[in-house]
Amino acid sequence: MKIIVTENYDRSCEIAAKMIADVIRAKPDARLGLATGGTAEAVYTYLIKEYKEGNLDFSKVSTVNLDEYVGLSPDHPQSYRYYMDNKLFNHVNIDKKNTYVVSGIGDIEKNVAEFQRKLQEKPIDIQLLGIGVNGHIGFNEPNSVLKEKTHVEELDESTIRANSRFFRNIDEVPRKAITMGIGDIMRAKCLVLVATGKAKAQAIRSLVIGDEIYCRNPSTMIKLHQNATVIIDNELAELVGYKKD
Ligand code: GLP
């Protein structure tokens, strides 16, 4: 696992965006694995900028997202479909038919099965990841066991609290989500995880320091990946006591 320390969050996102852009330039019909959350936003801003400057073509790109809240319709402003449309897809020349965010409404079991089929269709060339305050990736929450495949996950109290900032109040935060499993994430050819902020210190510490893998910090699984990059800023690196060796 490669660890990059940058001067600030903005630079971290620029580097992650550049990694994604390079994959698209090398393979115009690449399949991107995308993430939501506050951290990923600036990555999308950079990708849009590259597109607007004529340096990137999304016309053949396909995407699949990590997760979606159960109970939120695609047009709900806090759904991850809505987020993706507004933060990226509506601003680049991607064909929306080639974008996939699992639906959080209707027959959930059927949606999970459809998501699994989607993932089998074509491998993900590069998967963008954020990290939860408890170390979750996608919505794979800390537990005594982790799930390999796409499934419905019961959200952790800490996740509900952290994500309540996007809702009017905590009671509006969905209690469940559909998420790629750890295996689905690990099957991506390349992983890039971006983290920033004090709240992520505990989760990032066990990811970037030591070689332990913990079910109570699902992000540590990516230490096993052949081509994973973690990008943190100086502030977070100092906070967790990470030093380049
Ligand atoms: C959500 C998403 C995760 C994301 C996390 C971090 O819980 N399911 O994929 O990594 O948020 O979000 P933020 O960047 O807003 O801290």
Image (cartoon, rainbow, N blue to C red):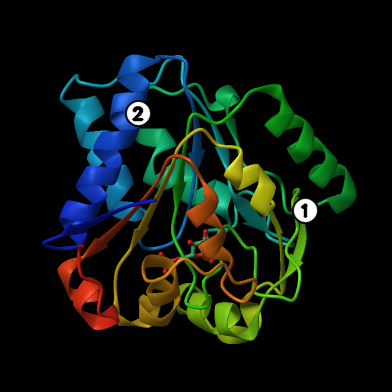
Write down the quadrant of residue 171 in the picture.
bottom right
Question: Where 21 sits versus 12, above or below?
Answer: above
Q: Which residue is mark 2?
A: 92
User: Could you tell me the amino acid type at mark 1?
Assistant: Ile
114 vs 212, left or right, is right
Q: State the quadrant of the C terminus.
A: bottom left
Q: Which mark is residue 214?
A: none
Question: Could you say where residue 150 lies in the image, as x and y percent from the top left?
Answer: 75, 49
76 vs 147, left or right, is left
220 vs 100, left or right, is left
Of residues 136 and 78, the one nearer the viewer is 136
Of residues 235 and 70, the one nearer the viewer is 235
**Which residue extends farthest left?**
7
Q: Looking at the image, which residue is at 73% across and 53% down?
A: 104
Of residues 198 and 60, the one nearer the viewer is 198
Inspect this view and state whether residue 180 appears: no
Question: Could you say where residue 157 lies in the image, as x and y percent from the top left?
Answer: 63, 85
Write down the quadrant of residue 69 in the picture.
bottom right
Q: Looking at the image, which residue is at 47% across and 21% down?
A: 30
User: Could you tell me the amino acid type at mark 2?
Assistant: Val
Q: Which residue is mark 1?
A: 105
Which of the two discs, 2 and 1, labels the residue nearer the N terminus?
A: 2
Q: Is mark 1 within 8 Å of ligand 1?
A: no
Question: Could you say where residue 46 lies in the image, as x and y percent from the top left?
Answer: 23, 41
Q: Looking at the image, which residue is at 56% across and 72% down?
A: 217
Question: Where 8 sits versus 148, above or below?
Answer: below
Of residues 135 and 108, the one nearer the viewer is 135
Write down the quadrant of residue 177 in the picture.
bottom right
Q: Secondary structure at mark 2?
A: loop
